[in-house]
Amino acid sequence: MNTFKKYSLTLLAALAAIGYGQSIKCAQSSAVSTSILGSALALIDPAQPTMTLMELTGGYPLLGSSYKAYQKHLVLRHAVRTFKEEQQLGRFLMGHKGPNGYELPSKLSSLIADYAELADNYTPPLTLPHQTGIASLIFIDGGKLVAAVSYTLGVNVWDTVSGKRTWTSEKSLGPSSSLVVLDPDGRFIASKSDLDNSIDVRNATTGALIKHLPEHATNLKTLMFSPDGKSIAAAYDDHTIKLWDIASGDCLKTLEGHEDCVRAVAFSPDGSRLASASLDHTIKLWDIASGDCLQTLRGHGDWVIAVTFSSDGSSIASASLDHTIKVWDTISGHCIKTFRGHTRNITSITFSSDGSSIASASDDRTIKVWDIASETCIQTLDGHAPGENLVTFSPDGSQLASTSSSDRAVSNTVKVWKKHQPVKEAFKEAFDARKAAASGSHAK
């Protein structure tokens, strides 16, 4: 039995026992709970040593130092929540008095078996440590690799199956910067000079300077490579956006129209349009060839700080300090969906490749995955530290990469999540189905 399954099921059984013991509200509740726990542990693993509730709840000695905190958090939090809701059905679902005292009923035995199967199929995310704050994150080679670049211009590349680091720059490829981005293929790095707001484009492997783009009078706020990696959009504190040709170093266009500075920009997949998110509470959609503003999207109640296109270019998603994510139709300019659920600032958003979902990273330490059609949150992924977190889908949508970045090296991590139905949601579905069946039987 794998470690995750064993410890998860042990906690689950303990909480079931506690829930039942509390539900009967009698002097023997602790003894009853202990008896049920013993039956559950025997079912889970006959070789498991007997433990009393006092031993289990007095610091969870089963959870050794090697047991990851997010696993403990996932199992414990959701099991507690589930079984607190079921205390009224505790006598029916969680135990009965047999010839040998209170025993584990067949319904809970079956429920634990369901959970065991789910736990066997659960794939924990890869957790990849990074020594310094992460500025940019992308999948490369069709999702086989994930690459991260730091604010100190250090690059790391990992295999998304094994989690092994396949390449590292070992040292900074240039001066540290407060603004760094990778091109879509991971070939180039663009970084801001914090001295004069100029832009350096470097080879992401060697650090060789490819082009130095001119300085600007006002502060550079955000950067983005075009899909073909041949140009860069740069937004400045004077409310303008400049489009730079990397080969020649020329400014191709200056886009003007925002009433406050732009915090994020995104190219459409075909590179023909640019979306810009501003502190003036709007998103603008620009035609690259003409420089004309095609749409001004209004509806957010605070600064708009993130923006992204769907893979077919038909939709834009935006995130604001009003803690909402909005999806917009790029032809009509209408807001077609609004998502609420994060409790702090949303720092990054991304569409899945098929356009059916959006992932968002927040300073509330969570990554959320939203189903666009139903306008609901279908997953909440925990485990990151607060900070300027990033999130991106792999090209085929089967993986999700996310980051934590802070001043503490221990908090700088990349996580790669595999697409699956999380145990906690799947188990809750199984439990809810049994609860409904039990309620129906009880009513009869």
Image (cartoon, rainbow, N blue to C red):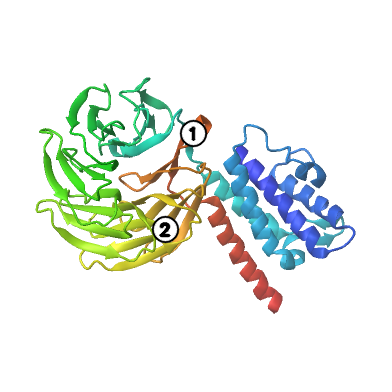
Q: Secondary structure at mark 1?
A: loop
Inspect the image, locate mark 1, and give the three-letter code of the amino acid beneath it: Asp
Q: Quadrant of the N terminus?
A: top right
Instruction: Tell me where residue 259 appears, x and y as whole percent.
Output: 26, 57
Q: Residue furthest front?
A: 217
Q: Are marks 1 and 2 in contact (CB under 8 Å)?
A: no
Q: Residue at x 76, y 45 (%)?
A: 57
- Asked if one can make out residue 383 in the rendered structure from this viewpoint, the answer is yes
Q: Nearer the viewer, residue 391 or 43?
A: 391
Q: Residues within 10 Å of mark 2 (few under 14, many from 20)?
A: many
Q: Which residue is mark 2?
A: 370
Q: Is residue 285 left or right of residue 363?
A: left
| Position of residue 78 measured from the top left corner of the image (x, y, whole percent) | 62, 54
Q: Is residue 311 visible?
A: no
Q: Which mark is residue 433?
A: none
Q: Secondary structure at mark 2?
A: strand
Q: Residue at x 53, y 31 (%)?
A: 410
Task: List the single residue furthest toward the right.
Answer: 27
Q: Nearer the viewer, residue 267 or 128?
A: 267
Disc 1 residue crowd, few under 14, some 14–19, many 20+, Cα 10 Å: few
**Direction bottom: furthest residue:** 444
Of callouts 1 and 2, the N-terminal one: 2
Q: CA distance from mark 1 to mark 2?
A: 29 Å
Q: Nearer the viewer, mark 1 or mark 2?
A: 1
Disc 1 marks which residue?
A: 407
Could you tell me which residue is drawn at 9 percent across and 54 percent down?
290
Q: Amino acid at mark 2?
A: Trp
Q: Where is residue 107, by image quadrant?
A: bottom right
Look at 44% across and 43% down and name the residue there.
417
Horizontal and vertical percent position of residue 20: 77, 60
